[in-house]
Structures are given as structure tokens and as C-alpha cells.
Image (cartoon, rainbow, N blue to C red):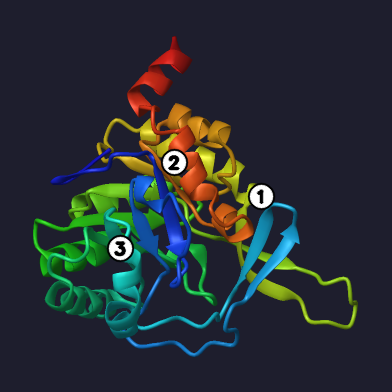
Amino acid sequence: MQLGQLTLRNPVCLAAASWQLEGAGYERLGAIFTRTVTMEPQPGLYEEGIWQVNEQTLLNATHMRTESAEILVQEHLPNLRRYGVPVFVSITAPGIPGFRKIARFLARETAGLIAGVEVYIAQPDAGQGEELTAQFVRDATQAVRNELGPAAAVIVKLPPWPEHIRSLALGAQEGGADALAATNLLKALHLPDDATAAPMVGGLSGEALRPVALRCVWELAHDERITLPIFGTGGVFTASHVTDYLRCGASAVQIASGEWLEPGLTARLATECAHLHPETVSSEWKS
């Protein structure tokens, strides 16, 4: 997969990487994406608010604690870089000035240490879907691109909205993105078995997200206006799931929930899928 000046050597990537990532085989990955950070730490209501809804589906809590970009750089980045694969910092912010600020900080503090950033585009928890526009995505992407310069890769991770994702992707492309990621979390609610307990509100990931994410990848890959490579992300647990995303038009995948449920899964799939090439998989399927 080509990302600006960078070529990923494997289609399997780790997303939302644990700060204390331990184990063998991660040196075979295409890339490592950090957990999403903000400029200032967000205390949140949960330190590690992830609930297992069923065997392969997770609910990631709204208002989970978010680490700061400064702590990432000072304490966690060296651990993630020791595997010798490209590291991308996932960032989010409530508005364009926030994206500009965190990108400026990373440009100053991580020159030569990271391959680029992932711009995590999320709908505000209390907002309505129409509030997130292609113009906002374009402006956020452009703000990050301007601060990082041409050498760093900019990947934009979009919401799981098949009916709107094409227009949002065009905004990212116009803003200077090098690639797209489809998708981030799907808003959901889980009711605990205890009828007196409050509902668990958050973002769905894992098995339940995969059909929606596959449709989003399909939408992006079948729009002739969109020329950027695509990361498929959502519910990857097997080599067949990797192939499914490549068949739909992705060039690589990100694994997060699978790694959380089964540490070491990403490294294993990187070994199993090292031979896969998106063009070959796609052409075999279409023929």
C-alpha cells in the first residue's frame, strides 16, 4: 500500500495499540496506529471503558479517558517504535483549531519519529448527523496537512455512514489526505442483564460493525472521483476477513477489537496475509 512517500510492506496493521504492547511478531505488521489522543488529556468517566457485548463485539464507552499528545510522545511512543514498523498517531479534536494545534505539536515534537497521523473524524456525542459536513472534513484535513508538511502521511478515518461517506471522503481528498480509513465506531447502546443498571452508551466495534464497514469500503472504492487508498477497519478476526476487505476495494486493514480480545492476533494475521496483494485479490474476485 502506497501512502505518499511511504510503502507499507504488509496489508495488516494494528489499530488502537496498547501503550504497553508486548509480544512477538509485531515487526511483521504494515503499521501501528496509536490509540486516539487529544491535545490535552480528557479525564472522562472511564479509565478503560470497554465492554464485551458478545463473543466478538465490543462497546467502547462514551466519555472514556483520553491520553494527551504530550504523554504519548514522552512515555509511549518509544515502546511502539521499537518494532521497526511505521507508527501513525491517531488524533481527534472538537474543531479545526484543535486539529491544527495538535498537528503543530506533533510536527514539532515527533519529526522523523512517526510516519504520519490518522485524523479521527467523529460526530459529537450530542450532535445530529447533518452537523458533520464534507467541508468540516476538508478543513480539518487541510489544517493537519499544512502543519505536518508533505513528508508525513495523513489518513482520515470516517464515520460508518454508507449513505454519506462518499461526500465526506471527497472532503478529505480535497484537504490533502493520503488515504482513508473506513470506519470508526458506530454509535450504540447496550442494556446490562441487571434491569436496575443504567444503559451502557458508546461506540460499537468488532463483529457487529464489519458488515457496515465493508459497505463503506465498497462505497468509497466504487466512486470514480475518489482516488485514495483505503484501510478497512471493523471486525477483522481471520485471514478471510482480511480478504473480504480487499475484495471490497481496501488496500489494507486495521485490527483493534480482535487484538483486544486476542492479544497477538494481528501479528499472526500479518504472517498469514503477507502474500496478499489488493490488486490480485480484487481482480480474482471480479473475474
Q: In percent of the image, x 26 and y 66: which residue is there?
A: 140
Q: Which residue is mark 2?
A: 270
- For badge 1, the amino acid type reads Ala
Inter-mark Cα distance, 2 to 1? 23 Å
Q: Position of residue 248 (x, y in %)?
A: 46, 30
Question: Is residue 122 visible in this depiction of the protein?
Answer: yes
Q: Position of residue 234 (x, y in %)?
A: 54, 49
Question: Disc 3 on helix, strand or loop?
Answer: loop
Farthest front residue in view: 24
Inter-mark Cα distance, 3 to 1? 33 Å
Q: Which residue is mark 1?
A: 208
Question: Is residue 233 visible in this depiction of the protein?
Answer: no
- What label sits on residue 82 in the rendered view? 3
- What label sits on residue 216 in the rendered view? none
Q: Nearer the viewer, residue 133 or 74?
A: 74
Q: Is residue 222 left or right of residue 244?
A: left
Q: In percent of the image, x 16 and y 58: which residue is there?
A: 152
Q: Is residue 83 left or right of residue 244?
A: left
Question: Disc 1 on helix, strand or loop?
Answer: helix
Vertical side of 214 occupied by 71: above or below? below
Q: Position of residue 182 (x, y in %)?
A: 44, 48
In which quadrant will I find the N terminus?
Answer: top left
Quarter occupied by residue 132: bottom left
Q: Residues within 10 Å of mark 2 (few under 14, many from 20)?
A: many
